[in-house]
Amino acid sequence: ASCGCDEPRLEPSGGVYNSSEVRVDLVATPWDSRLECEVFYLVQRVGSEDAPAPWASADAAAGVLRSQGRPLRFRDDGAAEAVVLRYDFAAAAAEAAKAEDEERRWPQ
């Protein structure tokens, strides 16, 4: 959010999903600052549960979101559109194979 109002609330905010697709509400109730704020989001692949934060600070994150993020869209009734996250097994497997190949070539 690029404003001084309520922090957006994510739902679902955790869990285990046995699906290749999850619908995420980026501004779940009681977030009510639609008229005062713009919300930008960026989807990134996470390789492990303990992955480090992609930015060093909140200011760095805000800058990247403003320049590279997608604006959250709202419907005519004022409700935010859900963001749909999809897990692409083929892409994940290709990425893992590439990482294994790099590790074989450049062992630490």
Image: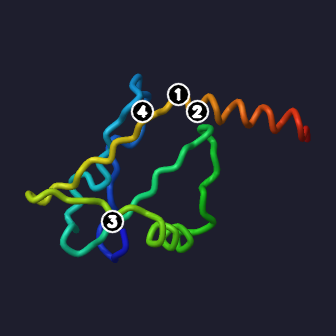
Which of the two labelled residues, at mark 3 and mark 1, occupies the earlier sequence position? 3
Position of residue 65 relative to residue 54, above or below, is below
Q: Nearer the viewer, residue 79 or 98?
A: 98
Q: Which residue is mark 2?
A: 92
Position of residue 38 relative to residue 42, above or below, is below
Q: Which residue appears farthest toward the top when viewing the image? A: 18
82 left or right of 22 in image: left
Q: Quadrant of residue 99?
A: top right
Q: Secondary structure at mark 4?
A: loop
Q: Secondary structure at mark 3?
A: loop
Which of the two labelled residues, at mark 3 and mark 2, occupies the earlier sequence position? 3
**Residue 65 pos. (x, y %):** 46, 66
Position of residue 38 relative to residue 79, above or below, is below
Between circles 3 and 1, the one closer to the viewer is: 1
For the point 30% across and 60% down, the residue is 72
Q: Which residue is mark 1?
A: 89
Identified by mark 1, the residue type is Phe
**Residue 67 pos. (x, y %):** 47, 71
Identified by mark 3, the residue type is Val
Q: CA distance from mark 3 to mark 2?
A: 28 Å
For the point 41% across and 28% down, the residue is 20
